Image: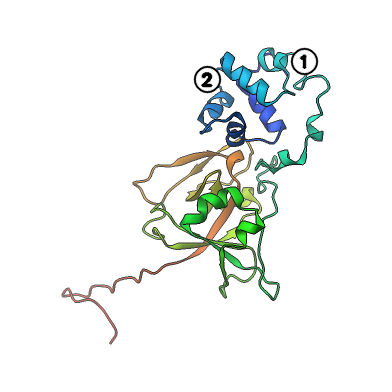
Amino acid sequence: MSQEMQVGDRIKAFLEAHGLNAYQASQKLGHEKPSKVYKLVNNDARPGYDTIVELLTAWPDLSPEWLILGTGPMLRSGSAPVDDLPLFAAKAPALPERGISGGRTVAVTVDHTGHENILMVPLRDQAAYARRHDDPAFLDKLTTFRLPLFASGTFRAFEVDGDELHPGIRRHDVAVCSFVERWDLLAPGSACVVVVPGSVLVRRLPAPVTERRQVVELLADNAQIPPMHVPAADIIELWQVRGYLTTRVPAPPVRPGGRPGGGE
């Protein structure tokens, strides 16, 4: 690596080579939040002595000469090449160079006829879903159902937590979504459920995800809610909203004279 790279650039390169995002690296380092690692990899902060020691302790194969000075190989002599690392490193939701879903095969359940179920993810289970979205034992505990217009494909149903898509979709409505395999082919403005570490978000994507290093803008229909920005490498799953279920029945229109409309 060139000495012109900053330390943060080398930290970012090391984590990417190991298939880790900032959230997972923070967990490895024992940090409660990923904000410190984000600042390091974005060169918004320079690592101090304690941070350097933390990194070298967490990853003994990391070469201190390469990390601090940018000289020599990334890994210490005798360490396994990155391509030979254990398979658990491949579980990180890192994107390929193009925006194809994070390299995962989505987990599904089927009914007695072999048809895929729609899994219902209520609010109380969404934090757990972000962690255990590919755990069959967890998925088997979720409520399943089928809808006649959603019979071909892989679908999830997510209870909506906020009013990001208000006035169309409101809190406690259920967004029925299809799995997005190619993130780079999403139509601009698509409403999506975005699964990130620790959270499930419902927002619009103004543009497709085309690069693993890009920061993805997430917009709300509700003008009172500001945009969010999430690193593409932190997105675990994308589900495009195809419809929604609601218990709210629209009020009848008001006719001239102030009387509500109704049947004749």
**SS at badge 2:** loop
Query: Residue 107 in the image: x percent, y percent?
Result: 67, 57
**SS at badge 1:** loop
Query: Residue 144 in the image: x percent, y percent?
Result: 57, 68
Quarter of image, res 93? top right
Q: Amino acid at mark 2?
A: Ala
Q: Which residue is mark 2?
A: 45
Q: CA distance from mark 1 to mark 2?
A: 24 Å
Above-or-below relation of 189 to 40: below
Which residue in the rendered view is the most extreme toward the bottom?
A: 264
For the residue pair 169 and 158, the one nearer the viewer reads as 158
Query: Residue 188 in the image: x percent, y percent?
Result: 53, 50
Above-or-below relation of 119 to 84: below
100 sits left or right of 227 in the view = right
Q: Amino acid at mark 1?
A: Gly
Pointer 1: residues within 10 angstroms few (<14), some, or many (20+)?
some
Q: Which residue is mark 1?
A: 72
What residue is rendered at 72% in x and 13% in y? 65
Pointer 2: residues within 10 angstroms few (<14), some, or many (20+)?
some
For the residue pair 222 and 235, the one nearer the viewer reads as 235
Which residue in the rendered view is the most extreme toward the left?
A: 257
Quarter of image, res 178? bottom right
Which residue in the rendered view is the most extreme toward the right?
A: 78
Query: Residue 242 in the image: x percent, y percent?
Result: 53, 63
Split into 4 quadrants, where in the image is the C terminus? bottom left
For the residue pair 93 and 180, the one nearer the viewer reads as 93
Does residue 2 show up? no
